[in-house]
Amino acid sequence: MNNKALAAVTAVLAFPALVAAGPDDDNLVINDELDMISVTEAPAHTENLDTIYSGWHFRTDETQALQIDDFDNPAMIFVDQAADLFETVDGAAEKSCASCHDGVESFEGLQASMPKVDAESGKLVVMEDLINKCRTDRMEADALKWSGADMQGLVALIGLQSRGIPMNVAIDGAAAPFWEQGKEMYYTRYGQLELSCANCHEENWGNMIRADHLSQGMINGFPTYRLKQAKLISRHNRFRGCIRDTRAETFAEGSDEFRALELYVASRGNGLSVETPAVRQ
Amino acid sequence: MKLRLITLVCAMTGGAAFAAETGPKDVQFDDYGAIEQSLTGVAGDAANGALIVGEKSKGNCVACHELTALADIPFHGEVGPMLDGAGDRWSEAELRGLVANAKMTFEGTVMPAFYKDDGYIRPGDAYTGKAPSAPLTSILTAQEIEDVVAFLATLKEQ
C-alpha cells in the first residue's frame, strides 16, 4: 500500500460515513481514462428496479477515491501477487496457468458472462470452478481454497481483464432453472429476522441500516477489497455474511445454492461494467 | 386453587421465574395485531426498554428506526419510520403487538418479530451462521418486550 492510500484509509476510519440518502451522482472513471457504466437502465428481468447502480455510488468519497486510481487501490497488491501465481509452475503435471493460456489478457470478456452453464457437465459454474478445474485436472495440483487470497487474487486478475465491459450473463436455455433457483432464494425471508435479499437491497437501497448505506447489492465489483478486513472478499463470502446477519443458518461458500444465487444476482446487474477489484469500507 | 395452578405452570416451564408469563406460541393478537394482555403481568421498566432499543445484541431497533430520545447513540437507520411520537400514535396494546410481531399489524413488513420462536426458514444459532444447537428462543424475552413497550409509551410529541 502506498502512502496516499494509507492516508485515505486513515481518513475513512477517522471520519465515519455521514448520513446520505440515495446514490450519489459522481461519475466512475478509472485512471482518468476508463469510463465505467455504473448507472444504467435495469434489465427487463429485474422487475422491481428501474435503474441499477454500482455499489460504488453508495460509498463515501474517501472509499470511492481508492477505486478510481490503480495506484491507490489496495486490491492491486493481491492482483499483482496473482499475476506471479499465474506464471508459477505447480502440481504433478509441472505446469503453470501460463503454460496453457497465452497471457492473462486472453481472458478479456470472460467475467462478463460468468456464471455460466458448462456444456459438458450441464452444471452451473463460476470463476472459482474454472480455476480449480485447471488446477486439479490440468496441473494436477491442489484445489485452491474458495475465499483464500490465492483464489480470490486469481478471480480478480481474470475479472480485471474485462473491466469496463458490461455484465451480460445468460439466463435462458440451460441457465434458466439455475436462475429460477437463485431468484427464489433472493426473495426468501431467511433466518430469525425473516429478511430476504430483496427486503434490504430492493426495497431499501439508498436507506441507512444502522451505520451502513444500503446499496442494491450488485456483484459487478467482486472480488472487492474490504478495508475492514484488508483483503479481497469473494461473492460467496459476502452472501454468507448477509445471510448470517439475518440470524440464519447460511449456505456454504462454493455450494450449488450460492452458485445459483450468484447467477441471479449477476443478472440483476446486466448492463453495469465489470468493476473488479472494487473497494468497499 | 390459584397457588396450585402456578405450581403446575412452574413445573411445565421447568421452574421459570415468571410463572404468569405468556409464551410466544400462546400470545393472543386481536384483528388489528394488538395484544391486550401484558405478557408477564409485571409492569415494564422504561429505562431498561430504552437500553434494549439501542443495544445491538438486543432489540437493535435503531438499526432501522431513528428516535430523538436516543440521540446519544450514533447511527440510527431509516428503514422504518421515525419513532418520535409513537406513544401518541399507538396504544399500549398496539405497541405490544408491534414489538412482539409487527407482521400482525403490517402484513409483510420487513420489521422482524421479537416474540416468536418458530416458523422460520433456516433459522440460525444467533449470528453465528450455524444451525441452532438448542431449541429456538424468541429474540426478546416476555419481560424485555414489556420494557420496550413501556419505553415506547413515553415517546410523546408533548
Image (cartoon, coloured by chain):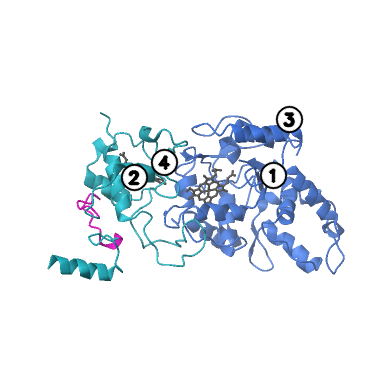
Residue at (14% x, 65% y) in the render: B2
Disc 2 to disc 3: CB gap under 8 Å: no
Colour cyan maps to chain:
B
| Chain A rendering hue | blue
SS class of the residue under badge 4? helix
Tell me the tag on residue B70. none
- Depth check: give the residue in front, A215 or B118: B118
Pointer 4: residues within 10 angstroms few (<14), some, or many (20+)?
many
- Which marked residue is nearer to the observer: mark 4 or mark 1? 4
Tell me the tag on residue B48. 2
SS class of the residue under badge 2? helix
Task: Give a yes or no on whether discs 2 and 1 share a subunit.
Answer: no
| Sequence-first tag of 2 and 4 | 2
Tag 1, which chain? A
- Which marked residue is nearer to the observer: mark 2 or mark 1? 2
Residue ID for mark 4: B62
- Cα–Cα span, label 3 and label 4: 40 Å
Quarter of the image for residue A172 reads bottom right
Q: Position of residue B68 (x, y in %)?
A: 37, 32
Residue ID for mark 1: A277
Please provide the residue range marked out in magenta. B24-39
Which image quarter is the C terminus of chain B in? top left
- Cα–Cα span, label 4 and label 1: 32 Å
Quarter of the image for residue A127 reads bottom right
The amino acid at mark 4 is Val
Task: Give a yes or no on whether discs 2 and 3 share a subunit.
Answer: no
- Which marked residue is nearer to the observer: mark 3 or mark 4? 4
Tag 2, which chain? B
Is residue B25 positioned above or below A239 on the image?
Answer: below
